[in-house]
Amino acid sequence: MKKILGLVLAVIMMAACFAGCGSKNDDGGSAAGDGNSAEKEKLVMATNAEFPPYEYHEGGEVVGIDAEVAALIADELGMELEIVDVDFDTIVPGVSSGRYDIGMAGMTVTEERLESVNFTTSYATGIQSIIVTEDSPITSVDDLFGDGNYTIGVQTSTTGDIYSTEDIEDAGLGTVNRYNKGADAVQALLAGRIDCVIIDNEPAKAFVEANEGLKILDTEYAVEDYAICYAKDNEELGAKVNEALEKLIADGKVQEVIDKYINAD
Ligand code: GLN
């Protein structure tokens, strides 16, 4: 017992030194006060910060609904949040292999993704919307299934990509052009290289607001649920994250964050 205690003490002292020695303005005794984060377990969240208002860059930081909700979850769990900005199509593989603890990127729960990762309770709804130029001959979703043979822009591996590939390209009704970022698809639309962009409604609104000459069609392509993914073999962490998320939903905290970014006028 003594031995174990000694070992524990040694580890604590090492950790304290670590925290203290690492801080530039070490005043000699505040390791417990301001150096605590070094002892907190990390919660590594993978996202793709090209998806306003859920995640985007501001002042060198990743901000948005997901970043704030994840910070609240990390707080609940006494963990330190680390956000990693990666390509959208690497999030699910990276989470399932254990490189990241969670994936949070306005990510829709789909059957296919459920084969490699688990999802928490849903915390928001997404709608696949269609952006066109103001003078576009496309006036409703149905037009995409007509004989216009349109070229559709999407972000690679998103549900917009998955649905339009299956429903339109594979059916021989049109072509799908895939881009790394939704913003690149929007630029292609503005340049006349594609006929429309299928993307989630909130980023769609942000892109239409930021660029003249674009509009969102009234009809929607699909309605879906956003949730946080975690590795199938990490049910322990997943359950904790889910519990924290459900508490934050019940307390109205998640809605507060969403309102701050979406409904505030
Ligand atoms: N909701 C869409 C999906 O999960 C798009 C997400 C995104 O581009 N960040 O595929």
Image: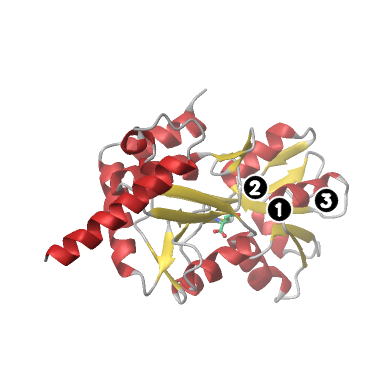
Left or right relative to 5: residue 178:
right
Q: Give the secondary structure at mark 1.
A: loop
Q: Is the N terminus in the top left, top right, bottom left or bottom right quadrant?
A: bottom left
Q: Is residue 52 placed above or below 233 in the rendered structure?
A: above
Can you see residue 149? yes
- Ligand 1 near label 2 (Cβ, under 8 Å)? yes
Q: Nearer the viewer, residue 246 or 160?
A: 246
Q: Are marks 3 and 2 in contact (CB under 8 Å)?
A: no
N-terminal label among 1 and 3? 1
- Residue tagged by mark 1? 181
- Measuring 33% from the left and 62% from the top, which residue is drawn there? 237
**Crowding at label 3, few (<14), some or many (≥20) Cα neighbours within 10 Å?**
some
| Other residues around mark 1 within 10 Å, as few (<14) / some (14–19) / many (≥20) | some
Q: Amino acid at mark 1?
A: Lys
Residue ranking furthest to the left: 1
Q: Is residue 128 left or right of residue 212?
A: left
Circle 3 is placed at which residue position? 188
Q: Quadrant of residue 94?
A: bottom right
Label 1 and label 3: CA atoms lie apart by: 11 Å
- Tell which of 189 and 37 is nearer to you: 37
> Which residue corresponds to the image point at 70% horizontal and 51% vertical from the top-left?
182
Query: Do residues under tags 2 and 1 come within 8 Å of each other at their CB atoms?
Result: yes
Coordinates of residue 18 in the picture (x, y in percent):
42, 48
Res 226 → quadrant: bottom left
Q: Which residue is mark 2?
A: 50
Q: Is residue 233 left or right of residue 180?
A: left
Disc 2 marks a residue whose amino acid type is: Glu
SS label for mark 2: loop
x and y, in percent, of residue 56 in the image: 61, 42
